[in-house]
Image: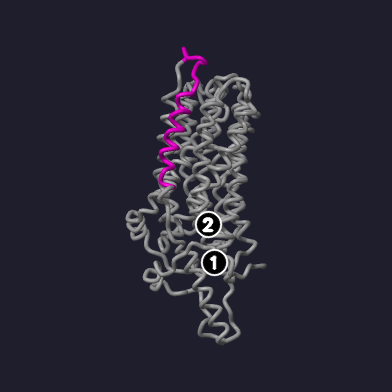
Amino acid sequence: MSSVIISEKAHISSSLPITTDSISSSASSFSATVDKGANKADSETIVYGTTWVAWLQVLSVMLVNSACSIMWLSASSSPIAISEWLKVDFTALNWLSNVSAIINTLFSLLTGWSYQRFGIKANIIFAGVCNLLGCWIRCIAIIVPEKSRYTAMMTGQFIASIGGPFIYNIAAKLASVWFAPEHRGLANTLSTLSIGMAIAPIIVPLLSPTITNVPKTLIIIAIIATVSAIPSVFLPASPKIASSPSSGQERMSVRQGVLCLIRNRSFWWIAILCAVNAGMVFSVATLIIEAISPYGYTDQQSGYCAAAVVIAGFAGGICSGYWVGKTGQHVMLIKLLTPLMAFTYIMFIFEMIPNAFNVILIACIWNGFFAYALFPLHLELACEISYPVPESVSSALLWAILTAAMLIFCVIIDALRAGPEADPPNNMRLSMIVVAIIVCVGSLPAIWLKGDLRRLAFDIEEQKNNETQIVKR
């Protein structure tokens, strides 16, 4: 098994905005438990790093995450065909997605405790099993009477959505346990960004162009959910070598961590920024199909726009995750990317027009790139500034807040939809104006954002101590 041995590099230590004096009192009580060989043979050294199995863990998380996202967005990805098949209007159809958002908010509050109590592997398996069960229950809608289809769909959606937060929230904990500091940002990005959010708007309209194809689509989605849940069963529960000094350190209890976060002003600035950024981009990705359809665009074109948001976001997240892994410049990147992200929503106001598909597509690309580049930065920075609060607690609280915000945003966007008498009918022009205002105002906390990278400072300090001990031996 290959590994990467961490050593303090001059260019990293000189560029990181870290103040170790501010953490000395809190970190002193957390002794280096990973240094099991400190009092043993002189030849024994401590190796920290990222193993190749860690990247397989990320792949398994991405598979389950994507399957859960496909389930979540399946109804809104082909709204015309599926609403006709279910015999409901768009508002009722959107509540299939809204129910997922509500469940994500409620169960996100439990994920921090669950990660600490049962570990990463058990939670990945639980998420995959819940999702596949819910997807197969949705297939019951195929055989029940027409008037009971919506009930069966909602029941399956509810059960499948229970597993969602246990995989959506796991990125920060996974990165902390399995990845070295220079890889944590990238791992967080890969684990957070869901390919399913890009796939659903493309494949669902292709699979169900008419109401006769909807049953086949539900079965295919259930098969995807089943296959994606299998790999996590065969992967180990923990790495063979510690990823970093901080990965083996004792953390606060869940209760202590929550109380600490409540008193942390910087965490609340991050929470507001994360809720507005991620909550809104997830909402827009869910409703973009309905937003541009009144202007004469097909479900397929709308699907390309929704997929463009996620695919561009994947690129943006990779760039930001790689950069912070090398430099630790979380705050700088957030301050730089936040106004650019906010500007893309202003672009939407003026670009929701007929016969301008390329322009709308470009706006979606920029929106996804900046918004998704920010999301893993928010998660990582929250873990850094709150150390030694468990990463599972800080990320779970962020996810609970952002999914609650997403639900509110979805309801607002849908409520501001124009009526059938408007020009064009059922347009969402007012919704886009309100979205831009919310994002611009909610992005203001980036001005006051600051915080020390406590976890990274601890890793660097412990690694220096380890190297010093090796030299003395």
Q: Which residue is mark 1?
A: 14
Question: For residue 329, which numbered disc appears in the image?
Answer: 2
Quadrant in the rendering for residue 41: bottom right
Q: Residue lying farthest right?
A: 2
Residue 205 within the segment the image draws in magenta = no
Q: Residue at x 53, y 73 (%)?
A: 463
- Quadrant assignment, res 294: top right
- In what quadrant of the picture does the C terminus appear? bottom right
Image height of 344 relative to 315, above or below: above
Q: Secondary structure at mark 2?
A: loop
The residues bearing labels 1 and 2 have C-alpha atoms spaced at a distance of 12 Å
Which residue appears at 43% of the width and 74% of the height?
31
Which residues make up the magenta segment?
420-446
| Nearer to us in this view, 121 or 142 | 121
Element at label 1 = helix
Residue 427 among magenta residues? yes
Q: Is residue 352 visible?
A: yes
Relative depth, front residue between 14 and 277:
14
